[in-house]
Amino acid sequence: MTEINFKGKEFVYNHHLSVPFHPIVPDPTKGIGEPALDGNLIIHGDNLHALKSLLPFYAGKVDCVFIDPPYNTGNEGWCYNDNVNAPMTRAWLDANPVGEDDGLRHDKWCAMMWPRLRLLYELLDDHGVMFMTIGDDEAHRLTNICCELFGPENHVATFVWRKVDSPNDNKVAITPDHDYVLCFARDITAARFSRMAAPSILDAYSNRDDEGRLYRDRLLKKNGRNSLRRDRPTMYFGVESPDGEDVFPMHDNGEEACWSMGSKGVQRHRAAGTLIWKKITKLDREVWEPYTREFAPEDDPTRPFPSIWSDVDTMRQAKAMLRQIFDTSDLFETPKTVKLIRRIIEMCAGPDALILDSFAGSGTTGHAVLEANKLDGGHRRFILVEMEDYADRLTAERLRRVSEGYSFAGKHRTELLRQKITWSTLRRSDKVLDEITKIENLQGHQYDSIAKTVKNGDLVVTGEKAVTERIEGLGGSFTYCTLGDPVELDSILTGKALPSWGQLGAVLFNMATNRTANPAAGREADFYIGQADDGQHVWLIYRPDLDWLKSPEAALTLSRAKGIAATASAGRHLVFAAARYVSQKMLTEQRVPVEFVPLPFALYRIDRS
């Protein structure tokens, strides 16, 4: 069994269980369209709390998770802020922010990731998959954590994404031009992956037959490695030519070769009319050579996805896209590219997939989902969680602009040269100036001007061109949410935090059935939450009103129990309520299939201070 050990693991191992539920509170002024908790969501709040609060609605329903967690390079200054109160852990947890001088920063990073990954696992569908970008500092630890949580057999692949496409002149021996994209499946036997579109495969089929079908002819004789008779003796046999003579495989140098298939395969081609004979010159004489005819695939050709991704955009293009959307300088240090997330969507997220990103950052995942839907008419949904204060002004604002369209007016800048300014650079300044002059002469006609600046010790040469255009919107809508006060006993008892009927009902349904509630099935008017897989019906007699909860209206009575049972004769009924005026014994004696469950508080007995 794969296991990773880190300081504090025993205290965070089941920490996700103690995290309280927070109501997800829509803000109708910051989204697009009518607020809906079953549509696209952007949640501003701590992602550990948000993931726990999503469980009642989305446990086992997420098709694809993409996260871009802190890389823990030592330069990020992230803070560990989970409420882990074990006294033995406080001394090292309180040393925030986490920096490169913190000798326990890797342990803290593991302690931060562990409960979040456990909740993400619970949210995944049985066929769901998770993708995680990470750098060298924590790639091996993240792999080990996921092997322990998912099982090593569910490690799909570790992809390599080329994130940098411009030369690095920092005078270092090695430059990190890539990130890792770890992929784990909840159950690799149930995971569903697509193949990569590969139209270039058709280029190999350059001929057409009389029926207009594209084809290519391939030598029946095997070439290259293991192509000699002694390598594959059973593949050396005679094949009858049009002259009636047996032809044996022979290399151009006279060595005995072998066929690329056995006799049964040759017979199948002969029967299908795809065994083709051509006259060629070999060893100074004309001989028959057999070929097999292959027709181009009738459907769009595909191939497996590669594990090295050098064909998607880099961070340079990602930053350029953000600059265009917001018409301003860099807003986010390490944005991921839309094409990177699109690659993931193409691999495993079908037209109706639900995609979750709990480290949303600049909102690239939501952008990629909207773009994918625009291109193929899909109905994919996204859930983005971002805890930082830019959740509204950057994450959500980006989605507002790309959904509705935006005007781009200003200068389009293309970086043409970047060079570190050092003493040696100054000593050969004439060569640097010549290089700039060459750029101006060769590329100057493409731009309105060529700007030369020195920024953070770098000489940057940029081509600038004034543009004014309207970018068409991708369509789509989303609901912007925050997290309300936690659903905790003390807060409820005092009446300070009474969750809505829907929020509390979803939490209780999940706790009682280990399944997610369907908001469309609930009927707040008569307190019905929904039906579990085993046929049991769940009810919640509740209103977020302290005076009402103290009144007889909030109690389960015999007549109310009979009314509930009459709604569905099959199956039992689980009823949450603040009080009851009928005993369970009486319900059983009168054969009323209703079971009373007290709410986790007794508000009807509490006097408001």
Image: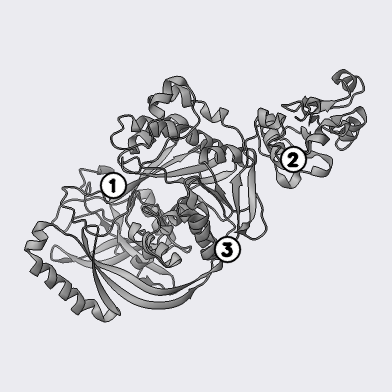
The answer to the question of whether label 3 and label 2 lie on touching residues, with beta carbons closer than 8 A, is: no
Is the N terminus in the top left, top right, bottom left or bottom right quadrant?
A: top left
x and y percentages locating residue 76 in the rendered image: 35, 44
Q: Secondary structure at mark 2?
A: helix
Left or right of residue 102, residue 327 in this image = right
x and y percentages locating residue 509 in the rendered image: 70, 34
The quarter of the displayed image where residue 335 is located: bottom left
Q: Amino acid at mark 2?
A: Trp
Left or right of residue 193, residue 5 in this image = left
Alpha carbon of mark 3 to alpha carbon of mark 1: how far? Answer: 50 Å
Residue 479 in view, yes or no: yes
Q: Amino acid at mark 3?
A: Gly
Residue 279 or residue 45, whichever sits in front: 45
Alpha carbon of mark 3 to alpha carbon of mark 2: how far? Answer: 35 Å
The quarter of the displayed image where residue 578 is located: top right
Label 3 vs label 1, nearer the camera:
3
Residue that label 1 marks: 235
Residue 398 or residue 164, whichever sits in front: 398
Alpha carbon of mark 2 to alpha carbon of mark 1: how far? Answer: 74 Å
Label disc, if present, on residue 160 of the rendered structure: none
Residue that label 3 marks: 377
Is the C terminus in the top left, top right, bottom left or bottom right quadrant?
A: top right
Q: Residue at x 36, y 36 (%)?
A: 98
Please tell me which of labels 3 and 2 falls first in the chain. Answer: 3
Q: Residue at x 8, y 58 (%)?
A: 424
Residue 44 or residue 525, whichever sits in front: 44
x and y percentages locating residue 26 in the rendered image: 64, 50
Please tell me which of labels 2 and 1 falls first in the chain. Answer: 1
Residue that label 2 marks: 501
Residue projecting furthest to the front: 609
Residue 271 in view, yes or no: no
Q: Amino acid at mark 1?
A: Met
